[in-house]
């Protein structure tokens, strides 16, 4: 029964993702714009090496935005009344949130895979056009300079990062009292989490307070694990990053379960 419940919830989340083609398109456009605008501008100031630093951060951003949608799913289900049906299933509350987390993590991994495939395609196009005298770097400054990841590090790192980001989204979803409230909370959470992660710049030279915030930020360790996969500018050990992610993911799910049991499965009518 429990396996069937997990399968049904994850399949539902996956079907919603595949039907929302605009969401998949946004997952491709956003990181490419960051690589193009931020990466291109900073590369002119910091040198070619900046692309190697930025790429793991951009892939981490894709996982972060993809995982946070798990919270939106909870807010939508509470608002529509679907969550009431889920809590009537003969499973404990924590299994609902774990299933939502797994569904969101899977969606984030799909979006990451599509982004990596797109970037690989652009690298292939660069390799084809260069002998013909067409310099694609004039339009896309990162192509031809990408160091591609070690898959045996990338795959477990991406799974851990996706689960952590999805757990953060689920945690926000349990605290949100409405869909609008979740949208505000998501913007309030996601940008500090991203900018205090070292995704765009190293953590060590930051001002002391910002550095401490970054060290307490689980997403910093998501990005750093991806840096290990790309053999680029890692600041922590793999063991430390994986330990922090496992502990923080479990902690977020425990808090989310407690909050969900307190607030119930529906959006209050007075919100």
Image (cartoon, rainbow, N blue to C red):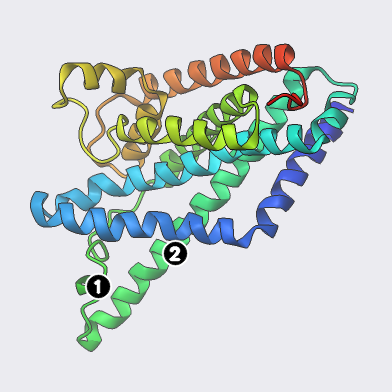
Residue to which mark 1 is pinned: 139
Residue 43 in the figure: left or right of residue 58: left
Q: Position of residue 78 (x, y in %)?
A: 75, 32
**Which callout, 1 or 2, points to the residue nearer the camera?**
1
Residue 200 in the figure: left or right of residue 82: left
Quadrant of the image for the C terminus? top right
Residue at 78 percent of width and 33 percent of height: 6
Q: Is residue 210 above or below residue 46?
A: above
Q: Position of residue 107 (x, y in %)?
A: 61, 46
At label 2, counting other C-alpha atoms closer than 10 Å, the crowd grade (few under 14, some 14-19, many 20 or more) is: some
The residue closer to the viewer here, 145 or 76, is 76
Q: Secondary structure at mark 2?
A: helix
Q: Position of residue 143 (x, y in %)?
A: 27, 65
Q: Position of residue 100 (x, y in %)?
A: 69, 33
Q: Is residue 208 above or below residue 84?
A: above
| Quarter holding residue 203 | top left
Residue 254 in the figure: left or right of residue 15: left
Q: Is residue 147 above or below residue 172?
A: below
How far separated are the C-alphas under marks 1 and 2? 16 Å
Quadrant of the image for the N terminus? top right
Residue to which mark 2 is pinned: 118
Residue at 40 percent of width and 29 percent of height: 219
The residue closer to the viewer here, 261 or 104, is 261
The residue closer to the viewer here, 205 or 117, is 205
Q: Secondary structure at mark 1?
A: loop
Residue at 23 percent of width and 22 percent of height: 210
């Amino acid at each position: 029964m429990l396996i069937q419940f997990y399968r049904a919830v994850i399949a539902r989340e996956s079907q919603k993702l595949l039907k929302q083609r605009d969401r998949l398109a946004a997952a491709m456009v956003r990181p490419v714009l960051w690589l193009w605008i931020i990466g291109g501008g900073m590369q002119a100031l910091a040198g070619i090496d900046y692309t190697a630093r930025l790429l793991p951060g951009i892939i981490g951003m894709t996982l972060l935005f993809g995982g946070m949608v798990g919270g939106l799913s909870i807010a939508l289900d509470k608002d529509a009344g679907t969550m009431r049906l889920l809590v009537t299933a003969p499973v404990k509350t924590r299994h609902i949130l774990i299933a939502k987390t797994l569904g969101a993590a899977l969606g984030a991994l799909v979006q990451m895979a599509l982004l990596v495939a797109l970037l690989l395609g652009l690298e292939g196009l660069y390799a084809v056009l260069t002998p013909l005298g067409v310099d694609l770097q004039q339009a896309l400054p990162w192509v031809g300079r990408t160091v591609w990841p070690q898959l045996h590090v990338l795959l477990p790192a991406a799974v851990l990062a996706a689960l952590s980001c999805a757990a953060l989204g689920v945690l926000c979803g349990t605290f949100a009292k409405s869909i609008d409230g979740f949208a505000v909370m998501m913007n309030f959470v996601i940008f500090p989490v991203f900018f205090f992660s070292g995704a765009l710049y190293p953590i060590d030279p930051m001002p002391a307070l910002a550095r401490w915030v970054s060290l307490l930020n689980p997403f910093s360790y998501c990005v750093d694990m991806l840096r290990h996969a790309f053999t680029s500018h890692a600041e922590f050990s793999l063991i430390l990053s994986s330990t922090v992610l496992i502990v923080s993911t479990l902690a977020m799910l425990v808090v989310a379960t407690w909050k969900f049991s307190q607030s119930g499965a529906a959006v209050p009518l007075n919100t």
